[in-house]
Amino acid sequence: MKTVQLIPKILRNESIVMIQFPYDKKLIGSVKSIEKSRWSQSLCSWYMKKKDFQLNRIFNVFKPVAYIDYSALKSTNDSISIKENVKRKAYSKTIIPNAYLEYLKLKRYSENTIKSYVSELKKFSAFYASKDLDTLTKDHIKDYLFHLVQKNKISASSQNQAINAIKLYYEKVLKHSKFKFIIERPRKLKTLPKIISEFQVFNLLKHTYNLKHKSIIALLYSSGIRVSEVIALKKEHLNFVNHTILIKQAKGFKDRITVLATSTAKVLDAYLKSYTPKNYLFEGQNGGKYSARSINKFIQRNAKSAKIEQPISAHTLRHSFATHLLNNGTDIRLIKELLGHNSIKTTQIYTHVSDRDLRMIESPIDTIIRSQNSDKQQFNDDNLTLKYNGNIGTSTDIQ
């Protein structure tokens, strides 16, 4: 019987309970049935906010299929809770120097980057709440990063983000020498982009009944644009005559042109006749930009209806767009321009996901069977002991 572990943790300065177990489709189905359970990419774990967590609900769902280990919850004593509360209070009271915010804004960092960097510097400052931020040394920084990696088990990408935010303050704002502030960065994990098949994309659209949602998913996949670019689109950025989309001041503050698919144009035309957006192409209930988080939520919800088992997001559709183009023979340099990549090296990662070249390779075992089958037909030898029926299964003997 599989084991489900319940482990208390802090995520984004909020108490949570991680629900950890080895990969198992039945257990994934069980945890998904629990209201307000969520998946964390950074923790690689399912979790619930502590305020929503009820142990009896967990038992009711998992008891028939798994052993529930909640010893970590039982060992969580009041002193730990007090310590966490002190940390949260220190974080909330931490004031970021104006010079840091001004630098980020003057350098035209995106809203998301500013938000992330400010949060990382606040966490670092709160960790040393009794000390002046400007007096902290590289040893303090290394101790803090060691704590993040060893105690908080943060991912390599989260560690890099913390390093970047702290480095920027000391090197750019306080003008400390770069050589005075040396931190070993984690080795970047070489992971392949997660994609879905053309059939799964079609099925996702088929199970998306809300016209606005269907328009967004169609745009994300057919044009390969980022979710941040979708929510920044305006009606005048769409050219229904030339079937192009103008992406204004995207990542790296560059304008670019990408493709507007004929089928997507029809969906958008129907959308614009039913909805009357005032400023942005897609707006929230109270006006203004549509939420990227809301987009990922309805994509995940509709993917479940479409029987897509792997976790997907808006970015999965962008990865799928690039990979499917490559599979169909589109020049990688053109894909680079459509995606808005600075370097062809970034685009080349899709060559590792594309199966275009793999489809041209014949496995040695298929070559052997084809060769033996050909010999059987050529010589018509009654004593030949090879039995071949077109597949490799229990009825195929290679003697």
Image (spheres, rainbow, N blue to C red):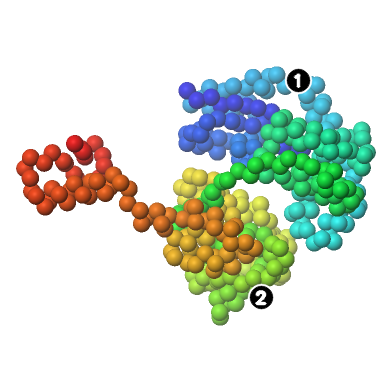
| Marking on residue 236 | 2
Local SS, label 2: helix
Local SS, label 1: loop
Answer whether residue 380 is visible to the viewer in this image: yes
Q: Quadrant of the C terminus?
A: top left
Question: The residue under label 2 is which amino acid type?
Answer: Glu
The residue positioned 46% from the left and 47% from the top of the image is 307
Across and down, in percent, residue 280 comes to 69, 67
Answer whether residue 37 is visible to the viewer in this image: no
Dot 1, crowdedness within 10 Å: few (<14), some or many (≥20)? few
Across and down, in percent, residue 173 comes to 88, 52
Q: Quadrant of residue 243?
A: bottom right
- The answer to whether the residues at label 1 and label 2 have Cβ atoms under 8 Å apart is no
The residue positioned 92% from the left and 33% from the top of the image is 130
Residue where numbered disc 1 is placed: 77
Across and down, in percent, residue 152 comes to 71, 33
**Between residues 29 and 171, which one lies in front from this camera angle?**
171
The relative height of residue 338 versus residue 3 in the rendered view (above or below) is below
**Between residues 344 and 267, which one lies in front from this camera angle?**
344
Q: How many marks?
A: 2
Dot 2, crowdedness within 10 Å: few (<14), some or many (≥20)? few
